[in-house]
Image (cartoon, rainbow, N blue to C red):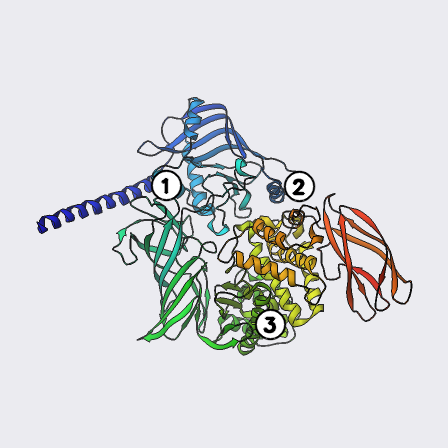
Amino acid sequence: MRNRRLAGLFLLFSLSVSSLLFAATEANATYAQLRAARPAGDPIAVQGLTLERDAFRFQFQSGNFQFLTLPDGKTVGAVFVGDGGYELRPAVEAERRQLALETGDKTVEILSDRFDSAVLLFTDGTAAEIRQKSTAGAASPRFGEVYDAFFKRQRKEIKSNLQLRILRDLLAAPAPPAGFFIAYVPGKKYPAGLALVDPSGLGWFAPHLLLSGEEVGFYAIPESDAGLWYLARLKSKANSAGPAPGPSARALHYAIETTIKPNAEIRGTTVIQVRPLTTGERVLPLHLLGKLRIQEAGSSETESGPWEAAAVVQETAEEDDDAAVIFASPMTSGKSIYLRVVYEGKDVLLNAGDGNFVVGARESWYPNLGTFTDLASFDLTYRCPKANDIVSVGKRIENKVEGDTRVSVWKAERPIRVAGFNYGKFRKIERADKESGFQIDVYTNTGTPDVINEINAYLRSRGVRHEIGESALVPGDIDSPYYNPAPSAGLHSIQVDVDGLADSAMADGINTARICNLYYGPLPESHVAITQQTQAFFGQSWPSLIYMPYIAAFDGTTRREIGLKDASDFVEQVGPHEFAHQWWGHLVGWQSYRDQWLSEGFAEFSASLWLQRTAGGKRFVDYWEKSRKWILSKPQQSAVFNCEAGPITQGVRLHTKRSPWAYEAMIYNKGAYVLHMLRQMMREHTTDPDARFIAMMKDFASTYTGGNPSTRDFQTVVEKHMTPGMNVKGDGKMDWFFKQWVYGTEIPRFRSKLDVAPVSKEQFKITGSVTQEGVSSDFASLVQVYVEFPKGEIAHLGTLSLSGSTTTPIDVTVKLPKAPKRIVLNAFHDVLALD
């Protein structure tokens, strides 16, 4: 009886394995058919055909279609040759402004263009709609030529695997209720582009932008103009407060084993605990550097296996290499599965010489389901040559040497948003700060990186100045606004002051920890490692781990000598900025790229708090004046002023060919200014002037710990703590402020003509006027008025509420302790202004 039962179980197991293998093979075959598909079959002709897809209207005046049909009869695309055109009517004003920026046409209301060919990809009802309004057509060799040209551009320029998106819908069970639509339109006036309409969200198209909440986009393709010219919710949901589409699964835990070879290539195995959020999906996209090639993948119901083979999609590195695994059976919502991925390759680490390494692929060095959004716990094991060491996120559990190999084990039990590490030869100092409760470790490199040798070779030869930028600085650094060659001071060699860097980083870290604790509240875990890394203008913050740029180890003379004379502010403030990301970015995240200022702007603001506490009031005011000028500036290579590029909510899309520095100016500097203005409005001019502001920031931090708030969520918290004076519209809302400063681009100009004269020994009369100009009729400002005394002391007098372009007369008598020098407005940059 037992033998029969075992035989029966074996038979069932064999059948199960066979069916799973068949399913995986079938999925691979379907994908292969999608990649190989070409227009075929009888062409059909159309006259005056119009396809409406949300904000897009496609008009096929006359011409022929030929379909892309798979062997099973499913039609997944079509190629058009003839006379056609498209219109894009923006659903919201911000996207109209984005089109104006991208096209250079301030008056543009509708983006329209003509084309003589197009490629459509779809899983909706497009095929039936075309067939319904067609007649017999004429064959043409152009069908294949048009599609082949498109497919080449997809692989080489778009670099997004569109067939993988089709596969998701074809394999889903049940099939999604609404399919997606993509049109490739090589226009005549504007760059060729992709019109994208996907009710499930566009997160798959550009994962690094966190686009999952928006369903409609236009992507301009050519390298010089590439970018999302349009991105919005479906028109039916444009004003909806309902949930936006999101990913089909999230990761709960990562177990990552990484082996670093002597040549700096890596081999890794990652096991991901996957929690499906929908039922029916078989395709799971992965974020992984294309140079890391997946060797195998498998799924299991348990963390330890056994592993059932999963099909893998990963095209050629540096092309449309979006990685994904295909499960043999659909995922079930809420039922966790485990995915094991084995991979190896190069370009995660760059050997910078003498035990120094640059860590590349910072968010894709391990296969993941997305970073900086969902939280997961991590177990991380690193194996590397014993002479080197690892500094990782999490807590070090073990560090031992086995033969020629160092084994370093780290664990992040509290869920975090992303994993990162630094690698090389390090010297460590550590300190426990009782006031903040932080344990801070600082790791500096012990060897001399190649970049220093290159700089010294340049200084000795005194060659052409620009050669240092091309050879010694990391690629891309010479485009930095900080790279500004200065006349030679006669320096012939430099040394990196790693001891000075360590001491400075430690002091800055301790001060920032104390300030952020005071203003935002304590972190759940108060341990941070600050590490040196060999890139000139790049700092980054991971959970409990910070990268510092190597120029932080140069003194002012050295920076001037090698063309970095304008980098002093960056060097001074990068540490506090990155440290503040432990709160803003890691403790509290952001919902989408439109809300990323809640991380970068808040961290930049934190640097201003650090500067005020450590360097005094004058440096604090100078900080905001420099920030103001950068927001209002028109840098080299820019066609527009930074402040004109668009509102804060356009996020990274502000970085365009016409506005290469607008993203930094708006998200970092103007984002910080927004928080600064709120602080100034909430100051109560008592012995504890920031009490209300601090309560608000702590409330926001605690409410959204581990969450991804939106700009609207932050506004709601602000409204809980607003002062009576901030209730400008009398509705208890801060819509007026956020509309102007976060969703808008207007910046006012203030002019004042104010005289002060004594009335008595303690009474002084202020007369004159204050003008606000250059803004719309409903633009409101709360302008702070101060009195300056002869020795530079400044005291607050009151607040003026201004609305629109207006002049307000002033005639008031005030009591002052001594004779004033003058009356001033906006003394502490309380409101961002043109002057």
Measured in 3D between alpha carbons, the distance from the residue under mark 1 to the one under mark 3, in whole angstroms, is: 58 Å
Of pointers 3 and 2, the one earlier in the residue sequence: 2
- Secondary structure type for disc 2: loop
Instruction: Determine the residue positioned at 37% across, 65% down.
Output: 380
Measured in 3D between alpha carbons, the distance from the residue under mark 1 to the one under mark 2, in whole angstroms, is: 40 Å
Q: Is residue 639 above or below residue 87?
A: below
Residue 652 visible within the image:
no
Q: Quadrant of residue 175?
A: top left
Which mark, residue 106?
Answer: 2
Please state the horizontal and vertical placement of residue 456, each as a whole percent of the image: 55, 74
In the image, 466 versus 707, the foreground residue is 707
Q: Nearer the viewer, mark 3 or mark 2?
A: 2
Q: Quadrant of residue 267?
A: bottom left
297 vs 370, left or right, is left
71 vs 671, left or right, is left
Which mark, residue 462?
Answer: 3
Q: Nearer the viewer, mark 1 or mark 2?
A: 1
Q: Is residue 170 above or below residue 390?
A: above
User: Decide: marks 1, 3 in contact (CB < 8 A)?
Assistant: no
Please state the horizontal and vertical placement of residue 505, each as a whole percent of the image: 55, 73
User: Decide: marks 1, 2 in contact (CB < 8 A)?
Assistant: no
User: Decide: marks 3, 2 in contact (CB < 8 A)?
Assistant: no
- Secondary structure type for disc 3: loop
In the image, 156 versus 90, the foreground residue is 90
Q: Is residue 110 above or below residue 132?
A: below
Q: Nearer the viewer, mark 1 or mark 3?
A: 1
Report which residue position mark 1 lands on. 167
Please state the horizontal and vertical placement of residue 139, each as a whole percent of the image: 40, 26
The amino acid type of the residue labelled 3 equals: Arg
